[in-house]
Amino acid sequence: MTPVSSTRSQNYQIKWGDTLSGIAKKNGTTVDALMKANPQIKDANKIYAGKALNIPGRVDSFEPAKGGKTGGTGSAGSAQGTGGTGPATRGPGGSPFDIAQSHLQKNAGSLKLEKNGVGADMEDWVPNNVNCANFVSACLEQAGQIKNSQHHNSVVGLQANLDKDPNFKRVSLADAKPGDVVSMKTPGGHHVVMYAGMKDGKPQFIGSNNVNSDGSQRITMTSMNYPIMSIHQYQG
């Protein structure tokens, strides 16, 4: 009963005989987390074969780069090379980059407990090792660039929501501005951060990253060396 691996989704297709508790055990999560990640399920004892089930935290991940290799170029190029410069993108509520920077070095688990700002917009149930899309979504919400209904805790889910939003367009790394949303392909799945400008000739990214010794995430700014799937720039 191995979950389906996909670069486009983190869904598991329910099979005949599956139970929610069994799926949770095999994927290192809980029934409660599965229920929260799948609001369409109203009764934990009633799931249906053939339906898609979101597995929280299964493919949204971040691992430090090894050996300086990206393993591909991605649709927007590798995180190596030149990046754009210029002022940060801004929404009606300010710059998502400035908002993210104000939370540097906070643990994602602690930030989620704050009662206002980014912390209030982050969803508490998301596991502390997979908060990257949760954090970026909250920063975009605080900047007024997306609505609460566009918040997504999956990298590919947020990517899809931005693709549908006419206020965003995909750009290349050469045209990126601080605050642009950068979705990457990692060995373990996907990761999303925001472009943070250039340093020593390398593009920098800010986001919720797995840098704590226990594997949980903290808000940090660093260079990364993964294939970039997309860069979304706010145009509103």
Image (cartoon, rainbow, N blue to C red):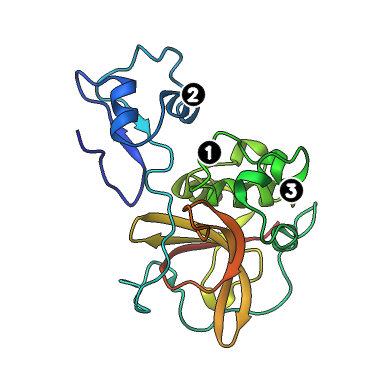
Residue 218 picture location, percent across and down:
59, 56
Q: Nearer the viewer, residue 44 or 88?
A: 44
Q: CA distance from mark 3 to mark 1?
A: 19 Å
The amino acid marked with disc number 2 is Pro
Residue 31 position (above or below residue 103): above
Name the mark nearer the viewer: 3 or 1: 1
Q: Which residue is mark 2?
A: 39
Looking at the image, which residue is at 69% across and 46% down?
A: 141
Q: Is residue 185 left or right of residue 26?
A: right
Q: Which residue is mark 3?
A: 142
Q: CA distance from mark 2 to mark 3?
A: 24 Å
Looking at the image, which residue is at 66% across and 45% down?
A: 110
Q: Secondary structure at mark 2?
A: loop
The amino acid marked with disc number 1 is Val
Q: Is residue 202 left or right of residue 236?
A: left
Is residue 8 among what the camera can see?
A: yes
Is residue 146 among what the camera can see?
A: no
